[in-house]
Image: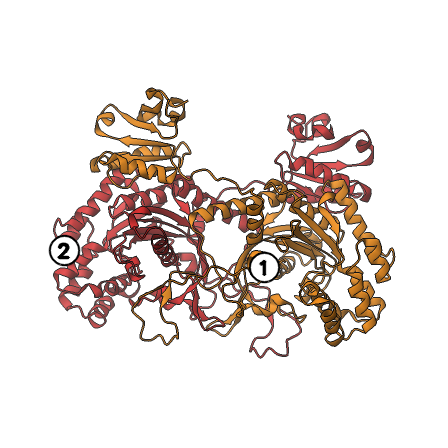
Chain colours: A orange, B red
Amino acid sequence: MAAFSGSTLLRPRHVQRRAISQKTDPSNDEPDAGFTLDPPSGTRDFFPEKMRMQRWLFDRFRETAQSYGFQEYDAPVLEHEDLYKRKAGEEITEQMYNFRDKEGAAVTLRPEMTPSLARMVLSLMRAETGAIAAVLPLKWYSIPQCWRFETTQRGRKREHYQWNMDIVGVSEVTAEAELLSAVVSFFENVGITSKDVGLRINSRKVLGAVLNTAGVTSDKFAETCVIIDKLDKIGADAVKQELSKQVGLSTEVADTIVAATGAKTLEEFADIAGVGESAEVQELRRLFALAEDYGFADWLQFDASVVRGLAYYTGVVFEGFDKAGVLRAVCGGGRYDKLLELYGSKKEVPCVGFGFGDCVVMELLKERGVLPELGPNVDMVVAAYNADMMGKAMNVARRLRQTGKSVDVYPEAARKVKKAFRYADKVGASRIAFVAPDEWERGEVRIKDLRCAADTPNDKKQCDIPLDKLGEIDNFFS
Amino acid sequence: MAAFSGSTLLRPRHVQRRAISQKTDPSNDEPDAGFTLDPPSGTRDFFPEKMRMQRWLFDRFRETAQSYGFQEYDAPVLEHEDLYKRKAGEEITEQMYNFRDKEGAAVTLRPEMTPSLARMVLSLMRAETGAIAAVLPLKWYSIPQCWRFETTQRGRKREHYQWNMDIVGVSEVTAEAELLSAVVSFFENVGITSKDVGLRINSRKVLGAVLNTAGVTSDKFAETCVIIDKLDKIGADAVKQELSKQVGLSTEVADTIVAATGAKTLEEFADIAGVGESAEVQELRRLFALAEDYGFADWLQFDASVVRGLAYYTGVVFEGFDKAGVLRAVCGGGRYDKLLELYGSKKEVPCVGFGFGDCVVMELLKERGVLPELGPNVDMVVAAYNADMMGKAMNVARRLRQTGKSVDVYPEAARKVKKAFRYADKVGASRIAFVAPDEWERGEVRIKDLRCAADTPNDKKQCDIPLDKLGEIDNFFS
C-alpha cells in the first residue's frame, strides 16, 4: 500500500557496471549486446550476509503478523495490467513495470499487493457460498516483492519487498486499531521506540464531507486526494491550481481544503473544514481512544496533511515517520472500502491495510544502531585426515546433524590441517572434528574447540568422543 | 537446475476464467479488454491454507540446507536475457518469459537460478581480492520462483518454486556426495523413504570420453547431451538422426552413444562405450563408495540414460525419481565446471548443484499420504462484551501476545456471544476470552476452553483470570 515510500529509494544506487567480454550472439541486434555482472538496473542481489539480515527482518514481520492471528497468502509477481487501471493520476499506476507477453496479454510486475489481495478475496467469496458472511472477516498478510519502472533517474530502485497486512470485512475502526497496534508491536520487537518513530493519522472521510458539502461529486474524490498528496512536493499554490484545473473545484473549496490540511489538531481541522463534530470526526476520536486502551497512544498523532497517494483509500489513512526527520515514510496504509466493487463485487466490502517497505526500515534500524548481530551460520566443521577417511567424515557429519547442529564437511582431504582450520574459522564454526585412522580404529572422533579461551586446560580444548556418543557432544565440552 | 521437471507441470490446470463485468477503459484496444479473477495464465495464487503448506515445505528446504552449513542467497526474478544465451537447443532457453523493458533492455523472468548464482559468484570473486582462493569453496542455497513461457498448451504452469543448492570451488565428487546426502536428508525429514524415491546417477564425462575418442570436437558436447536427453520423448531413431544431422556425428558414434545409454551397470556402460576403467568411471565408483560410507547408498542407482537437458553440465548428473513410476523427475542436478568461464572467468571454477521443484514434491507427499496436518493458526480469540469494552479487549490481547501466543481480536462488540464463538471456531482457536464490565471491575477476564471434552468439570472449562496473571494463563487450565 505504501509503494516505494522509502528515502533509500530516492538515493542514487552505486551503479558499477562491470562489462565482461563475451561472444556476441549474431542474431542479437541489441544496441548493448554484452552483459554485466550486475543484476538488471534498479534491482538487488542478496549475497548471504545481506540475505541473512533480510531473512531476520522477514521473520520479524511474520512473527508479528502471526501473533495477531493473521494468515499468510501470496500471489504471482506478474499480474494482469487491468487490475491497476485507475484514472486518478497516481504515480504508482503511471510507473508500472508492464509489458505484453508473447500471446499479447497486457501484464505487469505488480506495483503493489492490494489489488491482488482484492482479486483473491473476491474470487474466494464467490467460490465459497456466494454469501460474503461465510468468509469474512479475513486477516491476511504477505511479504511480496513489488516493482516499478521509471526511466528518468538511472540507478533508482525498481523493486522492493513490502510487508502487507490487511483486514477484510470490518467497517469499524477496531480494524485500524488492530493494524496500528501490529505496526507498533513490530517496532517494539526490533528495538524501535515511540521516540524514534511516530504514526500520523488522518481520515479521508472528513475531506469527503467537505467536498460533499461543496457539491463536488464523489467521482472526483480519488483524484482530489491524489493531488492533495503532492502538497509536500509541489507546494500549496500548485495543488490549488491542479484542484481547480483538473478536478474543477472552485477556488473557495480548493482554499478550504488546503487550509484544513494545515490544522494542528482534530478540533482545528473540523473547524476549518466546517464539518464540526461530525460522524467522521467522531470516528477518528474513537480510534485514538482505542489506541489509549490498547496501550500505544504515545505513538499516534493527528496530522491533517496526511492523505496518501493511492486513489482507492476512502477513510482513515496513516503513515509511519522517522522522528529524526531523516527518512521518508516508513510505512503507510488506510481504509479502502470501495476497491472490491471496482472488481465486480455487488456490495461494498470494507477493507483496511498497510504496506511496509524493506529498504527504509533497514535504513532506520541501521541509523538507530539496532540491527542485530547474527550468529555464525555453521556450528561445526568436519574434516577428513586423508581421502580414504572422507566417507567416514561425511558419516560423522550426518550423525552430528541428527543432533540439530549445522555441520559443514571440509571438502578436501585435510592433510594440511591449517587449511581446514582456516575454513572452519571463515564459516564461523565453534568446533572442528578431525576424522583420522587412529581414532577411527578405536571407534572415536577427535573434536577441537575453536572458541575457548587461551588458558583453557588441554583436556577441555580437545576431546576424543566415541562415535555412538556424538549425540551428547555438548556434555564433553561443558 | 531441474526446470519445471514435474509431472504436475504437464497436467492441464483446471482453468476457470471468471469474467466479470467492468467498465472498459476506452484507451484500451485489447482484443480481451475485461479481466478475470484468476491470476495470469499458468500462475498460482496461494490462499492461506495452501500458503501454510508451502511455508512448511520451504521451512523443510531451509532446515536441510542449514543443517548442511549452506548459506541462503537470492537474486532478482528479472534477469538480463544474455545470461541464458546458450545455443544447444535447450527447452529452457527456448521457452523464456522474456521481453523488452521500456528502455529497450532485453530482460526475462528467470527460467532457472544457476546463471544468477554464477553471475553473483563471479562478481564476488572479482570484488574480493581477485584471488579465487580467498572466497571458495562456497555452499549456497536459495528457493527462487522460476518462469517459462510456452504458448502451445494453455493451462500449463508457467512458474514454479525451486529449491537450489550449489557448491562452488570443489572439483572432487565429495561435493556431489554432499548434495545427494542433503537431498536424502530432506526426503527423510518429510517421511519419504528409499522405497518411494531413488536417485539415478550418471556422468557426462564418460560420454565426453566417447566423443573425444571418436574425434568429435568439444564444442559439440553440450548439443549432443541435450539431444540425448530427448531419448524418452522422441525415441532412439530420432535421437540418432538429430545427432548426425545437427551435430554431424557419424552413424557409428551415434549408435555407440545411444547403445551405451541402455547399459544396466557401470561396467556394462564402460564396456559398450569403449572407455574401460577410465578416470571418469573411477570417479563415479568413488561417488558410490562415499555414499556407502555416508549411509545413503540404498537411494542410489547407476543409470546411463540420465543425461539431463541443460547444456552446461560437464560431469556427474543425477535425478530423483518416483519409484511408483507416477511422477516425473522429482529433482535433478549435476556438475557444471565451465559455466563461470562463459561469464568471463579466466580460469575454470568447479561447480555442482541441484534444483528441486515445489509442485512435484507436493504431489509426491500427497500421493504417499505424508503431508503434515498443520495445527491451527490462532491460539486464542479475545471478544469484547460491548463497544465500550473493545479497547480493553485489545489490551487483553496485547498482554496475551506478550506470552508468545497468537491472539486474534474479534472485531465486533460481541453481544451476540454465538457469533464470537463461531468465529473462534473458524480460526481454530482453543480458548476465547470475554472482556466484560463485571469481571473487568474486579480486574479479571473470563476465559473459556473451547477444546475440552464434554465431561470436563465446569471449573476447568472456564476461568476468571486476574489481568496481571494472564502471563500464566496455561497454569489455570492444566
Mark 1 or 2: in front is 1
- Which residue matches tag 2? B272
Identified at 81% across, 54% down, the residue is A266
The disc numbered 2 marks a residue on which chain?
B
- In which quadrant is the N terminus of chain A drawn? bottom right
Q: Nearer the viewer, residue A467 or B266?
A: A467
Indicate the position of residue A281 as horizontal and vertical percent values: 82, 55
Give left or right: position of B333 versus A11.
left
- Which residue matches tag 1? A4
Give left or right: position of A416 versus B145.
left
Indicate the position of residue B401 as horizontal and vertical percent values: 65, 37
Q: Count up the numbered dots.
A: 2
- In which quadrant is the C terminus of chain A drawn? top left
Identified at 43% across, 38% down, the residue is A376
Give residue A31's quadrant in the image.
bottom left
Indicate the position of residue A405 as horizontal and vertical percent values: 41, 34
Give residue A205's quadrant in the image.
bottom right
Q: Nearer the viewer, residue A350 or A376?
A: A376
The residues tagged by marks 1 and 2 sit, at their Cα atoms, a distance apart of 61 Å
Q: Nearer the viewer, residue A432 or B448?
A: A432
Can I make out residue A47 in this image?
Answer: yes
Q: Local crowd at mark 2 within 10 Å, few (<14), some, or many (≥20)?
A: some
